[in-house]
Image (cartoon, rainbow, N blue to C red):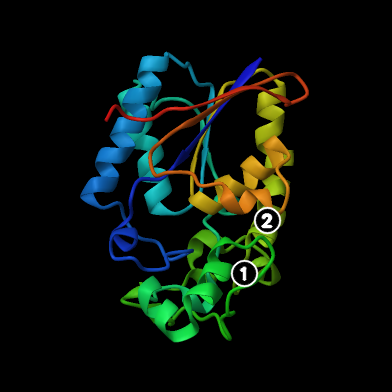
Amino acid sequence: MAKLVLIRHGQSEWNALNLFNGWIDTKLSDKGVAQAKTAGQLLAKEGIQFDQAYTSVLTRAITTLHLALEETDQMWIPEVKSWRLNERHYGALQGLNKADAAKKWGDDQVHQWRRSYDVLPPLLEEQSETMTIDGKTYPALDRRYQDVPAGELPKGENLKVTLDRVLPFWDSDISKALKAGKNVVIGAHGNSLRALVKHIEQISDDDIMGVEIANGEPWVYDLDEDLNVVSKKILKPEA
């Protein structure tokens, strides 16, 4: 069996401000740093020996992965970064305060945008390297995406579209490592990880709406050779 560990990044600066974050590249808050280290300490207690790491190209996920691996003395393992593991793109909602958005569009509408499987948020009308939100540049023409075909860069995503984005990387890289018997750790984001969980656990479109992955609480799967779930454990810090 192979082990697969999923770690949602620690609290980001914009999480702390209750802002829609999405593809905007923010850093961890002090609380987020502590959560990432705690995740690593929980994994160290489990004694899991990793062979391969994956993460997105966004700082908060990369930092979380590194801090967690440092706590397990495994920062040396091979690591692959992919934009396909980025957080869901929240479209025109990015940078908005969630409470303010609820006042503008109503609680039900914002909840539907956030939690539904196939309802898109308001889309960005344009993507420009000069577009900034609170000084954060929208990454349409960011150098980290220079090899991504322009038509594949999103203007807004729901979970269904996020899953369609993540799955090609699962098929081409992650699943192959697992089938080779490697223990894999993925440091990513709430929605890109929820998309993977939906696929791995074969969760229905309706039931995935109720799945929440907490910041810095690793999900540990044992998978058989066909990548069926044999066991699952969520590691939580002691109260």
Q: Is residue 105 left or right of residue 4?
A: left
- Quarter of the rendering containing residue 66: top left
Above or below, 227 against 20 in this view is: above
Query: Which of pointers 2 and 1 lies earlier in the amino acid sequence?
Result: 1
Could you tell me if residue 181 is visible in this image?
yes
Q: In this view, does 233 lie to the left or right of 65?
A: right
Q: Is residue 97 left or right of residue 140?
A: left
Could you tell me if residue 82 is visible in this image?
no
Q: Where is residue 226 in the image (x, y as percent from the top left)?
A: 78, 24
- Mark 2: which secondary structure? helix
Residue at which label 1 appears: 154
Q: Position of residue 87 (x, y in %)?
A: 52, 56
Q: Do the residues labelled 2 and 1 touch (CB within 8 Å)?
A: yes
Q: Where is residue 184 in the image (x, y as percent from the top left)?
A: 56, 27
Residue at image point 42% right, 47% down: 61
- The alpha-carbon separation of the residues under discs 2 and 1 comes to 10 Å
- Mark 1: which secondary structure? loop
Above or below, 221 against 150 in this view is: above
Pick the residue in front: 102 or 161.
102
Seen from this angle, which residue lies furthest left?
Answer: 30
Residue at image point 64% right, 49% down: 208
Label 2: how many Cα within 10 Å (few below 14, some 14–19, many 20+): many
Type of amino acid under label 1: Pro
Type of amino acid under label 2: Arg
Above or below, 118 against 194 in this view is: below
Residue at image point 66% right, 27% down: 177
Residue at image point 57% right, 61% down: 115
Residue at which label 2 appears: 165
Number of marks present in the image shown: 2
